[in-house]
Image (spheres, rainbow, N blue to C red):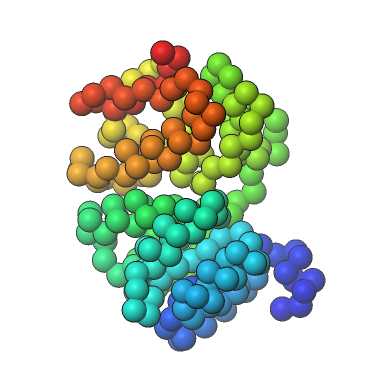
Amino acid sequence: MSKLGLDHHPSILVIEPDEMLAQQISLDLEEAGYYPIVASNRTVGLHQATELQPALIVIDRLLAGESGLSLCRHLRDLGNHTPLLVLMAKDAIEDRIACLESGADDYCLKPYRTETFLELVNLYLKPATSNNEQLRFGELVLDLATRRALRNGRTIELTMKEYELLKYLMEHPREVLTREQILENVWGYDFLGESNVIEVYIRYLRLKIEDEGEKRLIQTVRGVGYVLRDG
């Protein structure tokens, strides 16, 4: 695809050591109107993720000699907010938890299925709403068009899941939300109460929205869940 294609089609970086699978994913993405970029290992993938700034990154959990989840964590530690999707073979509770705790937004199961994969990609790359709607809670503002938060005039970049979690909390201000409600509405998965994914993402959000030492807004209700309230 030409440079013109890159300008008009969202680019997707696929970090996949299996050459045949990478080729299949690349063809599917191109046919679906995306611009695929393929990397066969972590080193090349990390470089392309940084230099090319793709719209979405797909990472195989099994990279040569190391875990793709460690790459997810590294990207998040670098401040990369790009949606991250992990390809993985197992769907056990502990696998889901490990995936999401790494900072990945979602996962797609192997064996690879074109329709399922593209549905997930489309979900994360659907255009943001073009209206000017905002959610407000005190000095905290969530812009639904840009999917960014603002507090005291400071712009806060969010990953897709951070955005969805904060949006859910701000849609129910001062209402105690159980862990089960949050899991169902933000992740859509049944983790049978065994996951600390929520705790991980609450911590991410608190670090970002309290970066300047501002008052805590996301309160823990011990044994129940969380509530967005001022004090």
Name the residue located 52 percent from the left edge and 83 percent from the top edge. 23
Q: Is residue 198 above or below residue 107?
A: above
Name the residue located 47 percent from the left edge and 20 percent from the top edge. 215
Name the residue located 48 percent from the left edge and 66 percent from the top edge. 58
Tell which of 175 and 46 is nearer to you: 46
**Res 204 quadrant in image:** top left
Residue at the far right in the pictured view: 4
Q: Is residue 3 left or right of residue 31?
A: right
Name the residue located 60 percent from the left edge and 74 percent from the top edge. 37
Residue at the far front in the pictured view: 213
Instruction: Judge whether residue 1 can be spotted in this image.
Output: yes
**Res 221 quadrant in image:** top left
Q: Is residue 181 above or below residue 17?
A: above
Q: Position of residue 115 (x, y in %)?
A: 47, 67
Residue at the far bottom in the pictured view: 20
Q: Position of residue 114 (x, y in %)?
A: 47, 71
The C terminus - image quarter: top left
